Image (cartoon, rainbow, N blue to C red):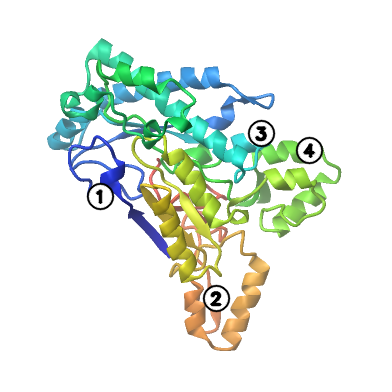
Amino acid sequence: MLFKVNINMRNILRGCLREIRATNPCGEEPLYPYESCNLGSINLYSFVRDGEFDWSEFRRTIRTCVRFLDNVIDVNVFPLKRIERNTKKTRKIGLGLMGLADALYALNIPYNSEEGFRFMRKVAEFLTYHAISTSCDLARERGPFPLFERSGYIKGEMPVNGFYQKELWTLNWKKLSEKVRGGVRNAEVTTIAPTGSISMIAGVSSGIEPQFSLVYEKIVPIGSFHLIDAEFEKRLRGMENSEALLKRVVQNDGSIQGLEEFPEEMRRVFVTSLDIPWWDHIRAQAEINQWICAAVSKTINLPHWASPDDVLHAYLFAHRLGCKGITIYREGSKSKQVIYMGWGKRSRQEEVMRIVGNKTLDVANKLGIRVEEGRVEEHVCPSCGSEDLIYESGCVKCPSCGWSECIIA
């Protein structure tokens, strides 16, 4: 059950010159025909120093990234002249984020808490505010995007919904509104992409997703070892019997929920994707969505026992909160099931055997399990053969070797 849909795009995407009819596959980049967008993502985890977030360094990095992405448009080699022409008419860039979950761990803030949602909202507002401001500076140096005179910027309008809700402001948007009237280099500046591959290279959580699992088992020719979330590993080092605790987390499908060996405060902060109810996944997307020019790629994870009504309510809730698009995945629902840490391998295999024993193959198929001649066949990684694949940020990927079905983004 994998759904991607764009909701109320005409009303939400302010300043568009015509109706948007489609987006890229992950849903975060609505574009006009033959447009392209250069994406880049900033690792939030790298700005946490001694338990505090370095907003000054974050601002400096945003300014550097905007200039870099604008340069990419000019040096890029486009596959078609029409793509080059349309891209340079609006000069859209998509600066985004990754490592949010790890940053929240380091700041000791639960992902699905009011403090967590406030942080998400502030980070997104800060990102877009300083990205637009930098784009205005670039316009003075190099000129605005060619279609600027036909945009809402000449009236001081902004392509973010938060601008029209003054009660949400933490920055001087009135001043920036005056600044954009003088010219903007890029029609859009921010996007939240999945970062399914580059976040694995950086060793942090992907996009704005919660961490999928605190511990993964990596299998290599010489044996196996465990990959541990960096911030969780720091906390684990200071605890007694850390090796035994690590094994307990592995047995608990990468989560510490329900493990009394861990302090309550630690269990409150170190939540994973399937520890968080679907409505808080949507809330997180909506909070960030308020301040992003394009859109947000985010997976709303539902457990295998979620009902059709849960899916319906998720869509309605996302629409009510003004999300530009939504991706829902209920575990066990794809024709080739990706193994989830959060279901529990042992309990899952017991359920499979019960199904096979009762010859209820239709039920097995609904669970995403293919049964042939009494044998259960799991979906495996085509690169290393690992069965511990996960579905996250719109992509199937392998934590063991880094393979992903998606392109690097």
Residue 86 position in % (x across, y down)? 17, 34
Q: Return the residue at label 1.
A: 22
* Relative to 257, residue 332 above or below: below
Which mark is in front, 1 or 4? 1
Measure how far apart labels 3 and 4 are at the Cα level: 15 Å
SS for callout 1 = loop
Measure how far apart labels 2 and 1 are at the Cα level: 38 Å
Q: Is residue 204 visible?
A: no
Q: Nearer the viewer, residue 386 or 292?
A: 292
Measure how far apart labels 3 and 1 are at the Cα level: 37 Å
Q: Return the residue at label 4.
A: 237
Q: Nearer the viewer, residue 236 or 134?
A: 134
Residue 349 position in % (x across, y down)? 63, 73
SS for callout 4 = helix
Which mark is in front, 3 or 4? 3
> What residue is at 68 percent from the left and 53 percent from the top?
255
Measure how far apart labels 1 and 4 are at the Cα level: 48 Å
Which mark is in front, 2 or 1? 1
Q: In what quadrant of the picture does the C terminus appear? A: top left
SS for callout 3 = helix
The earlier-in-sequence mark between 3 and 2 is 3
Q: Return the residue at label 2.
A: 376
